[in-house]
């Protein structure tokens, strides 16, 4: 049975040499298509699992993504006829924990931890990756990931944290088109 988005789904699974942004409503199969794309890329040998980055918004979704990816890699390994594909899939399964699958916040925190000088942070220091909770700006939620604190706060709090982290930088609140996800832009002066 054909659906209106079959061509888009096929492109996600098969156009492996281009970067894509997939935007769709909840429950439409984005995660399933992402998993199929990752499996296809790993099967083809285009990259290794340690070079895969897949980000979601919640830790629960990231855990589910990793689990589903393991299941699909195992299925693909079971049906692989080509020895090179089989080797690539076995390597991916053996090293799956090296894939960076997590929240966007944990990915950003990892980049800051690996490159504190470029981000103008004190090496070994603490970084606050901030955002506000749109449904209740006065509430803040703290999540601890490794040694990085992720805090969701109001616009004023974002600006104050930015001023502490980068005192000589130009700070500005930006928002996605949807207005749901404000973030702090820090530019060097």
Image (cartoon, rainbow, N blue to C red):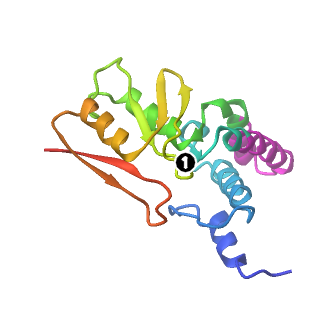
Q: Is residue 74 left or right of residue 98?
A: right
Quarter of the figure with the N terminus = bottom right
51, above or below 124, in the image: below
Question: Residue 181: within the magenta?
Answer: no
Q: Is residue 133 left or right of residue 59?
A: left
10 or 79, which lies in front? 10
- The residue at the far left in this view is 189
> Few, some or many C-alpha atoms within 10 Å of disc 1 (few <14, some 14-19, many ≥20)?
few
Q: Mark 1 points at which residue?
A: 136
Is the magenta region chiefly helix, strand or loop?
Answer: helix
Q: Residue at x 74, y 37 (%)?
A: 90
Q: Position of residue 67 (x, y in %)?
A: 77, 39
132 or 59, which lies in front? 132
The span shown in magenta is 64-90
Quarter of the figure with the C terminus = top left
Q: Position of residue 106 (x, y in %)?
A: 52, 35
SS at badge 1? loop
159 or 92, which lies in front? 159
Q: Residue at x 34, y 47 (%)?
A: 184
Q: Position of residue 114 (x, y in %)?
A: 39, 28
Q: Is residue 51 left or right of residue 123?
A: right
Q: Which residue is drawn at 70% across and 46% down?
A: 84
Question: Picture quarter containing residue 58?
Answer: top right
Q: Which residue is drawn at 38% across and 32% down?
A: 112
Question: Picture quarter containing residue 100?
Answer: top right
Question: Residue 75: within the magenta?
Answer: yes
Q: Where is residue 145 in the image (x, y as percent from the top left)?
A: 54, 27
Q: How many labels does the image show?
A: 1
58, above or below 112, in the image: below
Q: Is residue 94 left or right of residue 132?
A: right
- The residue at the far top in this view is 124
């Amino acid at each position: 049975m054909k659906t209106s988005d079959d061509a888009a789904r096929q492109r996600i699974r098969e156009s492996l040499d281009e970067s894509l942004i997939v935007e769709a409503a909840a429950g439409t199969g984005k995660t399933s298509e992402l998993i199929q794309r990752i499996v296809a890329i790993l099967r083809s040998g285009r990259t290794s699992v340690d070079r895969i980055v897949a980000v979601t918004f919640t830790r629960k979704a990231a855990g589910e993504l990793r689990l589903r990816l393991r299941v699909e890699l195992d299925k693909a390994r079971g049906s692989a006829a080509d020895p090179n594909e089989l080797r690539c899939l076995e390597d991916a399964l053996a090293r799956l924990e090296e894939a960076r699958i997590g929240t966007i916040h944990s990915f950003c925190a990892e980049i800051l931890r690996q490159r504190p000088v470029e981000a103008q942070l004190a090496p070994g220091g603490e970084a606050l990756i901030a955002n506000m909770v749109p449904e209740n700006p006065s509430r803040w939620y703290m999540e601890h990931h490794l040694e990085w604190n992720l805090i969701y706060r109001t616009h004023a709090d974002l600006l104050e944290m930015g001023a502490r982290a980068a005192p000589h930088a130009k700070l500005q609140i930006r928002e996605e088109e949807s207005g749901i996800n404000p973030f702090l832009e820090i530019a060097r002066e």
